[in-house]
Image: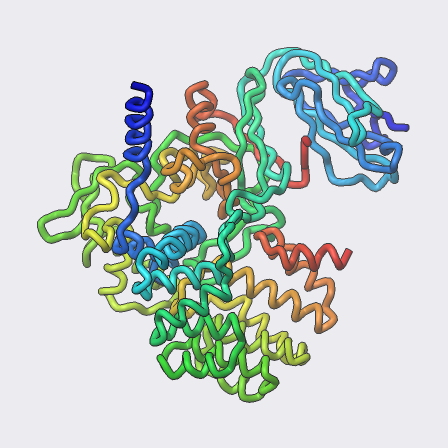
């Protein structure tokens, strides 16, 4: 009798567990760049996308959309709090590239994570019209010391906010703060978003403010940098908060 | 050594230095100074023994060395002891707060009480809404981020919207409403509005009347709002992309069916109250967020996020204060400066 009751209880528990989502359902939870752009709360869809991606890559390993969801969301917001698995952004990206070798957007995330010039060139080759790949190549080249080549890649008649941010970052990292400053200012004030990748406006805005703060600091404008860092810290920038603490 | 006293700049009304007692008429507040630190030179922790009678908030550090200043806000009739304790709990100083009299109901919100990391790992500044003239009821809330420039910081590329600290001031709650606005694409349709797909495959919603209004498709209200949002940012998208973005809000791409039979994605949640000022509506509302509305299991203080300038509530706390009759049209609602922090 007791065994029968335990069995009933277990059956009840099994039926109470939520049904596993299908691959199509998981894919439907991945937001598009435009879908995210028009939303008031832009972080929530990225968390949803991460959940769908991290679950989906094991369940539906042939879905490029879910591999991209996993690597892009983890690139943006990191692994979930309390995550105990062995995956890291690096390992996820390596796996994603193996599964989806023809995906320019996955190759681009990979190039940004590894800063590997060959991988970045491969991303550009996969889709020469995909601007994030071109910028990833510029950053990788700058990292390898080819700053002028990198800057040439960031040139555009109508630069987007992302283009300006990349150019300012390269100049700053090359120790050319005075050249970086006007570009960083322009990037921080620019609303000309590219919208080719999934990115919450608040994250890109915060990154632009952080970049401006660090550029001002390098250019010796500590007071103005502090003001910019204060605003960035109020919006949740940990880098800005740490910088403010060190400036005290 | 530590003690409470009035700094020369503070109003001494109601202060009895001998008895170390601050008398307060219900609904009023008073400032008190604290001199001294703990034995190891640490800051003392100041709080009321019964925070339903009176609540303490720390003001910015005054210019007189060694002093700190606290605001005592009375919430209901009664006496309570305010203590300044060491980290090990030893009382280094104390005073009695004696609250008497009657007051009409009103709410006071301290938006900058503390910064915490929410369940998603994001730093959030949260505060508390206190009901004055009742039984010390409170409700956690998150306003706009602190430290934003006056008038707000433009969120570049987001349709002219700004990120702003909720301005301190005295407001009156407007009527309880399902907030709608064409300025936010997800908020065109009221929360809970019935949805259907018409014979042309487009989504319709039933708003305030029984009339069905087109949401998606070339002439849909939500399509129009998406187009406006994109246009404001000088972006160019083909009409098909605009229409697809509007459809995606309502229709799940995997099934082609409605995500919900009634609309559950309005940015302002189920209910909102406008913070009116001088009889005029402002851009600020008290409201919940859709993710908290839709997931009661995780809708706690730990999932609050700072807003664009509104005051975000937890749905269960909103329901509690609505049921108690506090969240309602005509309720005075004061927003205090973010610089008033604590209590612990």
Viewer-side residue, B120 vs B332: B120
Residue A44 seen from this side: yes
Q: Residue furthest right?
A: B1
Please name the residue shown 72% across and 68% down the image: A221
Please state the horizontal and vertical placement of residue B114, each as a whole percent of the image.
63, 39
> Vertically, is A218 above or below A176?
above
Please state the horizontal and vertical placement of residue B213, each as a whole percent of the image.
19, 45
Please name the residue shown 64% across and 76% down the image: A172
**Which part of the image, by quadrant, shows the N terminus of chain B?**
top right
Please state the horizontal and vertical placement of residue B304, each as a whole percent of the image.
50, 40
Viewer-side residue, B194 vs B92: B92
> Vertically, is A124 above or below B92?
below
Task: Judge left or right: residue B52 versus residue B94.
Answer: left
Protein image colouring: rainbow
Viewer-side residue, A139 vs B71: A139
Quadrant of the rendered image containing residue B46: top right
**Which part of the image, by quadrant, shows the C terminus of chain B?**
top right
Question: How many labels sit on residues?
Answer: 0
Task: Judge left or right: residue A212 versus residue B228.
Answer: right
Quadrant of the rendered image containing residue A141: bottom right
> Vertically, is B234 above or below B215?
below
Residue A41 seen from this side: no
Please state the horizontal and vertical placement of residue B206, each as a whole percent of the image.
20, 39
Please name the residue shown 37% across and 75% down the image: A104
């Amino acid at each position: 009798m007791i065994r029968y009751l335990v069995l009933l209880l277990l059956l009840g528990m099994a039926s109470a567990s939520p049904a596993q989502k299908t691959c199509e359902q998981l894919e439907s939870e991945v937001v598009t760049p435009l879908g995210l752009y028009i939303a008031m709360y832009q972080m929530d869809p990225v968390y949803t996308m991460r959940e769908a991606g991290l679950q989906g890559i094991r369940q539906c390993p042939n879905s490029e959309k879910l591999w991209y969801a996993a690597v892009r969301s983890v690139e943006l917001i990191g692994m979930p709090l309390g995550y105990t698995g062995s995956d890291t952004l690096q390992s996820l990206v390596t796996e994603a590239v193996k599964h989806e070798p023809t995906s320019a957007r996955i190759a681009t995330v990979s190039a940004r994570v590894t800063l590997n010039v060959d991988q970045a060139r491969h991303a550009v080759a996969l889709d020469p019209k995909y601007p994030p790949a071109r910028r990833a190549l510029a950053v990788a080249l700058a990292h390898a010391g080819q700053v002028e080549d990198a800057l040439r890649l960031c040139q555009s008649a109508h630069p987007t906010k992302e283009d300006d941010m990349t150019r300012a970052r390269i100049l700053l990292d090359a120790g050319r703060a005075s050249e970086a400053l006007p570009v960083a200012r322009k990037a921080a004030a620019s609303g000309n978003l590219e919208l080719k990748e999934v990115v919450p406006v608040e994250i890109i805005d915060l990154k632009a403010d952080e970049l401006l703060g660090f550029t001002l600091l390098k250019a010796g404008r500590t007071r103005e940098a502090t003001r910019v860092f204060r605003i960035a810290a109020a919006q949740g920038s940990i880098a800005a908060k740490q910088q403010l603490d060190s400036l005290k | 050594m530590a003690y409470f006293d009035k700094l020369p700049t503070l109003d001494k009304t109601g202060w009895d230095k001998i008895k170390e007692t601050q008398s307060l008429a219900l609904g009023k507040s008073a400032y008190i100074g604290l001199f001294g630190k703990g034995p190891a030179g640490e800051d003392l922790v100041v709080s009321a023994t019964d925070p339903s009678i009176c609540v303490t908030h720390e003001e910015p550090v005054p210019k007189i060395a060694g002093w700190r200043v606290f605001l005592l806000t009375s919430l209901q009739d009664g006496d309570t002891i305010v203590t300044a304790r060491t980290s090990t709990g030893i009382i280094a100083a104390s005073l009695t707060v004696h609250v008497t009299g009657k007051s009409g109901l009103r709410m006071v919100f301290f938006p900058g009480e503390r910064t915490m990391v929410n369940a998603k790992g994001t730093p959030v500044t949260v505060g508390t809404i206190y009901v004055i003239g009742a039984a010390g009821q409170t409700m956690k809330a998150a306003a706009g981020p602190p430290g934003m420039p006056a008038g707000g910081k433009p969120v570049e590329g987001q349709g002219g919207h700004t990120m702003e600290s909720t301005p301190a001031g005295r407001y009156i709650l407007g009527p309880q409403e399902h907030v709608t606005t064409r300025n936010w694409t997800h908020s065109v349709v009221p929360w809970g509005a019935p949805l259907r797909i018409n014979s042309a495959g487009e989504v319709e919603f039933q708003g305030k009347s029984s009339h069905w209004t087109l949401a998606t498709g070339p002439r849909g209200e939500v399509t129009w709002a998406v187009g406006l949002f994109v246009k404001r940012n000088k972006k160019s998208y083909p009409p098909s992309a605009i229409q697809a973005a509007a459809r995606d809000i309502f229709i799940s791409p995997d099934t082609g069916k409605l995500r919900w039979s009634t609309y559950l994605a309005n940015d302002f949640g189920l209910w909102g109250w406008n913070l009116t000022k001088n009889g005029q509506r402002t851009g600020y509302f008290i409201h919940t967020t859709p993710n908290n509305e839709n997931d009661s299991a995780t809708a706690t203080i730990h999932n609050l996020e700072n807003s664009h300038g509104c005051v975000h509530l937890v749905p269960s706390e909103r329901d509690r204060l609505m049921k108690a009759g506090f969240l309602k049209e005509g309720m005075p609602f004061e927003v205090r400066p973010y610089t008033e922090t604590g209590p612990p």
